[in-house]
Image (spheres, rainbow, N blue to C red):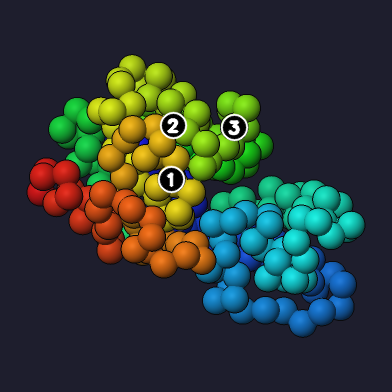
Amino acid sequence: MLFDLDGTLVDSAPDLGAAADQLRVDRGLPSLPLADYRPMAGAGARGMLSVAFGITPDHPDFAAMREEFFVRYESRLLHGTHAFDGVPELIAALQRRGLPWGVVTNKAARFTEPLVRAMPLFASAKAVVSGDTTPFSKPHPEPLFEAARRLGVAPQSCVYVGDDERDIVAGLAAGMKTVAATYGYLGALPLESWRADAAIKSPLELLKVLGLD
């Protein structure tokens, strides 16, 4: 079992949104509600800065503001971030059945590693692949291939769960079964276009999809 991180296992939108919002406040702009940031939380700095300032990566100030955002986020990595309801029970169920599991995220190791170290949930993860672990990030399949190698299983034996279209594209390209986590942040495209093998409305529904309930 392989999982995306943000929007699939953990809700990091409170800290991502707060970091971006602090940049607004620092510049004398009014604060925005978390609800404005949440839909774009899966897009990381690009998504947060697009909400906070309406800028895109081709903006001349984007690189500097992205690093400022990173520093802000790094300082509050776990202030509001928490596992989605049902995720600890899901992981425990996988553990009881002896199913190895891991994480494949586009989040940089700079943030992934301290986050997973700090949360007991991840103590049993057999693989944690960040966005810069390999030369590629999702939707390229290489991070998923790397996770399968670390688990010691063939990619075709893996199921990948994610809340963004890039997760499903990467999973399909790696030859894995894919599950869309519709409780997550989701991308801008309609879910039907993703071609996921299954969809779940809550983490524990995955056990039913896997025939383990």
- Residue 92 horizontal side relative to residue 102, left or right: left
Going by the numbered disc 3, the residue's amino acid type is: Phe
Residue 141 x/y as whole percent: 47, 33
Residue bearing the label numbered 3: 136
Q: Residues within 10 Å of mark 3 (few under 14, many from 20)?
A: some
State the SS at label 3.
loop
Picture quarter with the N terminus? top left
Q: Earlier in the sequence, mark 3 or mark 2?
A: 3
Q: Which badge, 1 or 2, is on the more N-terminal residue?
A: 2
Q: Position of residue 137 (x, y in %)?
A: 57, 37
Q: Amino acid at mark 1?
A: Val
Badge 2 element: helix
Res. 169 mark: 1
Residue that lies at the very extreme toward the bottom in this rendered image: 30
Decide if residue 129 is in sight here: yes
**Residue at image x 62%, y 54%?**
44
Residue assigned mark 2:
144
Q: Answer with the quarter of the image where residue 55 lies.
A: bottom right
Q: Position of residue 179 (x, y in %)?
A: 30, 49
Select label 3 or label 1 by which is in front.
1
N-term-proximal mark, 3 vs 1: 3
- Callout 1–callout 2 Cβ contact below 8 Å: no
Real-space Cα separation, disc 3 to disc 2, in angstroms: 10 Å
Q: Is residue 37 above or below residue 92?
A: below
Q: Is residue 83 visible?
A: no
Q: Determine the CA span between mark 1 and mark 2.
A: 11 Å
